[in-house]
Amino acid sequence: MFTFAMGEIATTPDGLPLDRLRRLSADEYLGLAAQGWFGDEKVELVHGLVLTMSPQGDSHAALVRRLINRLVRQLDDRYEVSPQLPLVLARLHVPEPDVAVIERISGMRHPRSALLVIEVAASSLRYDRNTKLPIYAAANIAEYWIVDVEAQLVEVYREPSGAGYRELARLGVGDRLRPPGLPTVDLAIADLFADA
């Protein structure tokens, strides 16, 4: 965790100044990944820094599987469901969201945008709200969902504007998820949390 103090230089926990860290570009990061530098470790590029991702617990993994299965069944051939794969959003950002719905792409390249991005938050709620949300908004991701495992609700963010979203709805188990940009998608939140 990085520490930040007013009037001081931001530092790492052991006191290294962040302004002296060498940040990687998306191209450099993807090149290192292709060469196997990160091995099997789950990482993503955020603000030019390579960050390790939290291990997935049972609830997190179950929700990701349910989301993928339901979305695949409801989307037509114009779209793909991209699970936990790189999404190249900017020069310093290559996050790996839990689920992204993208327009079908040809060739062997990572997508540069998504119509819907979903993060399942079991232990990462603060990170998904405070760090990832501004990245997705700045990349003009039309809709962003944070699935809060503990509260059994979904935060739905729409209408990106700068580093945030104009619209936020917190939906619970009695509600349904119907993204305007994907009119065939209609998910019951209760179904996602069944047996949770």
Image (tube, helix red, strand yellow):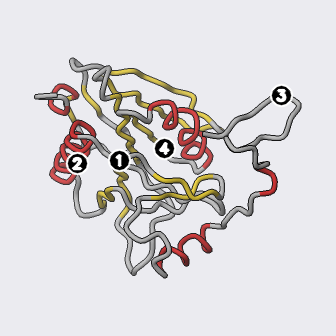
Which residue is outermost to the front?
A: 14
What separation in Å lies between label 3 and label 2 (alpha carbons)? Answer: 44 Å
Is residue 130 among what the camera can see? yes
The earlier-in-sequence mark between 3 and 2 is 3
Quarter of the figure with residue 160: top right
Tell me the residue that label 2 is attached to: 71
Instruction: Give the answer, above or below, for where 162 lies relative to 176.
Output: below
Quarter of the figure with residue 154: top left
Please name which of the two marks, 2 or 1, marks the residue nearer to the observer: 1
Q: Residue at x 16, y 28 (%)?
A: 196
The earlier-in-sequence mark between 4 and 3 is 3
What separation in Å lies between label 1 and label 3 (alpha carbons)? Answer: 32 Å
What amino acid type should be assigned to the residue bearing mark 3? Met
Q: Residue at x 41, y 71 (%)?
A: 39
Instruction: Give the answer, above or below, for where 4 lies relative to 181.
Output: above
What amino acid type should be assigned to the residue bearing mark 1? Pro
| SS at mark 4 in the image | loop
Is residue 184 among what the camera can see? no
